[in-house]
Amino acid sequence: MLEVTELTKSFGHKIAVDHINLQIEKGQLIAFLGHNGAGKSTTINMLTGLLKPDAGSISLEGHQPTENQYSHYLGVVFQDSVLDKQLTVVKNLSIASKLYRDCDKQFCEDLMQKFEIDTIKNQKYGSLSGGQRRRVDIVRSLLSQPELLFLDEPSTGLDIQTRKKIWEVLDQLRQEYGLTIILTTHYLEEANQADWVYVMDKGKIVASDTVDNLKAQYAKNSLTLFFKSEGLAQSMPLRENDQRVGKKVTVKITSYQEAMQTINLYQNDINDFEYVHGTMDDIFIELTGKEIK
Amino acid sequence: MILLNLVRRNLALYFNNRKRIFFSLFGVLISIILYFVFLKSMIQRGFSSIPDGVKLLDSWLIGGTVLLAAITTTEDSLYQKLYDRDSNRIKDLLVTDASYAQIDISYAISAWLIGLIMQFIVFVILSVIFMESDGLSIDISILPQLVLGMAVSSLVWTLFNIIIVMIIKSSTLVPSISSIISSCAGFFAGVYMPIGSLPTGAQTFLNYTPAPYGSAMFRDVLMHNQLQTSFQHVNPSVMNDFIKTMGLKINGFDTFNGNMMMSLLFVAILLVVFFALLFINKKNA
């Protein structure tokens, strides 16, 4: 559906996006991970046709960003709420819907119902809470019934109820008409539900795989053993990245079999144990480093 | 349809914001206050022998203030482009079927319409005020000519302010540029004081700007009949002196048509500047 080849963009001497390749199939939920300045926003801006690449090609259903039809295939939820604060929700949506050549009125009304906009539709957009605004932003981005939806940090500052509501409706839309979603997020756990994850660092894609494969490769599970005494804890040999604090020893484990073997080996020396699966945070730190960038 | 809808958005953003309307008419408000506080009595003293001189002065103020409204309201309307760009609102407009050119044209059309509407509203409000206070009567037959003048003024100042927006490029400069334009406009349109009372050098400089021709155009329409009545029994040199001092004759042009031609000449000049800037901006992009 979306094919990106050798996409490159520089600002002065700084290479923001460095020869990236993407292949995205219809109906997928794709997550873009990366710290601030990794090149996510520049990539999204090029994919949405807002920024001209220096080199490389973008093809969405066979259309290039320079073509008029291109924007018709996509919807964008920007990181900041960008609708007109002085106008009401319904006026904002009415104006936006008429900026498309063919907009299904019934689809727009259904969206308003699904995202529970009806009760706030006559309020000024500027007077809405962060969660209400975000729901309106998403409705606005879906007005043209796009094939591909870009969500740039959609959950920043939102409460859990709003986040759940948003994902509930988006999942429904994915099932109903095969909506493809590209998501950039700082909530790494939000990327857990993605079909495919791209991790960006310094303008390059440093990893690209399913969440499970990334976890298997980069996020080691950890096993914590609570020994009966400090002496017993001291007797356990440690490898790199293992930790010992008093009677507690935490070791990195690659498989559940290894965990069971370790527990069996020390079963007479311990009072308790804790087994924790690797998270997206671990993948992210493993791939992009611990330092603040 | 897309263009129409973009214009609808710009109009809604202006007319739904009372604070914005108030500040876009701030210069107009100052001119009215100045007139009532001291200008009216000061000028009146100089022409005390003229019958119904106060009605002439009222029309004179309406003419200049209507032009002031054209300058400041088109300016405020065009700043929407900078606000949209700096707040990233433009990005959301660009991911629709609207093109960059359509969005830009919509700002220009909206500014022209806002300028036209606000000039008419200022004209109506001032006419009612002076009808009540001084018994001023406005002949309805001058309305078509007046509206034509408003349309041309709105065009001149929309183009002028498009150029300003092209130069300043950022909304952070809006408050300072806006106050400079607003205060200069009052002098250039000859509202804060009659053009004839300015030093000769300043008068010559004003001849090369569009503002005095615009106000002279409105003043000619509004004051024509009253001038004939008030000055019918007075030496013609007194009337000529009045016309020159009060800025009804600029650079030898003292008729509606003459000043209209001069305004259209400025439209042509501003268009040349606009296309030159467009070319330079494209080259530097």
Image (spheres, coloured by chain):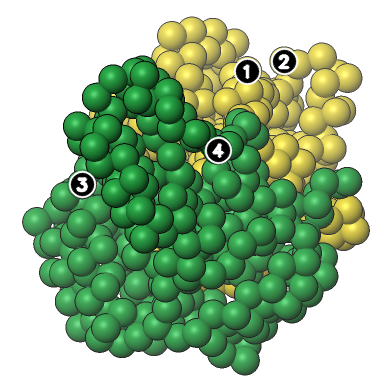
Chain colours: A green, B yellow
Residues flagged by tags 1 and 3 on a common chain: no
Q: Chain of mark 1?
A: B
Q: Nearer the viewer, residue A121 or A17?
A: A17
State the residue position of label 2: B197
Residue at the image point whose x is 25% and y is 86% from the top: A176
Q: Is residue A53 left or right of residue B46?
A: right
Q: Nearer the viewer, residue B76 or A2?
A: A2
Can the viewer see residue B119 in this picture? no
Residue A239's mark?
Answer: 4
Q: How many marks?
A: 4
Q: Chain of mark 3?
A: A
Q: Nearer the viewer, mark 3 or mark 2?
A: 3
State the residue position of label 3: A160
Mark 4 vs 3, N-terminal side: 3
Q: Tag 4: Cα neighbours inside 10 Å, few (<14), some, or many (≥20)?
A: few
Q: Nearer the viewer, mark 1 or mark 4?
A: 4
Residues flagged by tags 4 and 3 on a common chain: yes
Mark-to-mark CA distance, 3 and 2: 69 Å
State the residue position of label 1: B193
Residue A108's mark?
Answer: none
Q: Are marks 2 and 1 in contact (CB under 8 Å)?
A: yes
